[in-house]
Amino acid sequence: MLADQTLHWPGGDCRLFVGVALNPAQQQQMAAVLATLPAGLKPVPAENLHLTLRFLGQSSETQARALWAQLRATSLPVFSVRLEQLLCWPGPKVLCLAGEITDPALRDLDASISQAAASAGYPLSQHPLHPHLTLARGAKQFPQSPVTVPALQVQPTELHLYQSVSTPAGVRYPILASLPLVMA
């Protein structure tokens, strides 16, 4: 699939983030894991699974277009990250599958996104990049019953600008634009 580099703005200010999607096989694999999570956790819908690279927050169209123009003018590297550690983050109350940054290309991509965000007027990120896939919300502590999650090797081919939309049926993450990641 060719990345749609055009930014399709939905109107008004929007809550945005930059991230990558799982491939269909990984999405299906994680959907099976989500179905086994213990009661009390709210599994993330399989179609919402993604790896956030930079949360942007409330954004104007002008900011988003400036960010996307700078990213389009940058060679964005393909990266790989292995997610293999099940973590519970009690602050945001999420259960996630996390990994370490071992690929220099991911550090380079993070630096490019941070530079583009700063140039577009976004505040500096409050947290360093910690690659993770949110599996469930409402996790105040690590589940008592065992949760088995296979390691996941993520090597995306596209970078996406996502919108976070709250609806009565839950949050949706439509993709507003995509850019190809390229081999170095």
Image (cartoon, rainbow, N blue to C red):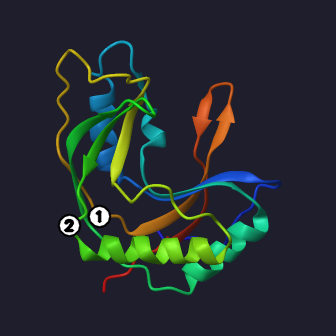
Q: Is residue 75 above or below residue 45?
A: below
Q: Is residue 109 above or below residue 90?
A: below
Nearest the camera: 37 or 31? Answer: 37
* Residue 117 percent coordinates (x, y): 59, 71
Q: Is residue 180 above or below residue 94?
A: below
Specify the amino acid type for callout 2: Thr
Residue 182 is left or right of residue 161, and the answer is left
Q: Which residue is mark 2?
A: 102
For numbered disc 1, what is the local secondary structure? loop
Q: How many residues crowd around disc 2 within 10 Å: few (fewer than 14), some, or many (20 or more)? A: few
Q: Residue most toward the right? A: 12
Q: Which residue is mark 1?
A: 155
* Residue 72 percent coordinates (x, y): 57, 81
Nearest the camera: 28 or 40? Answer: 40
Which image quadrant for residue 143?
top left
Q: Can residue 23 be seen in this snapshot? A: yes
2 vs 1, front mark: 2
Residue 162 is left or right of residue 92, and the answer is right
Specify the amino acid type for callout 1: Gln
Which image quadrant for residue 89?
top left
* Residue 138 percent coordinates (x, y): 44, 23
Q: Residue most toward the top? A: 39
Q: Is residue 91 above or below residue 77?
A: above
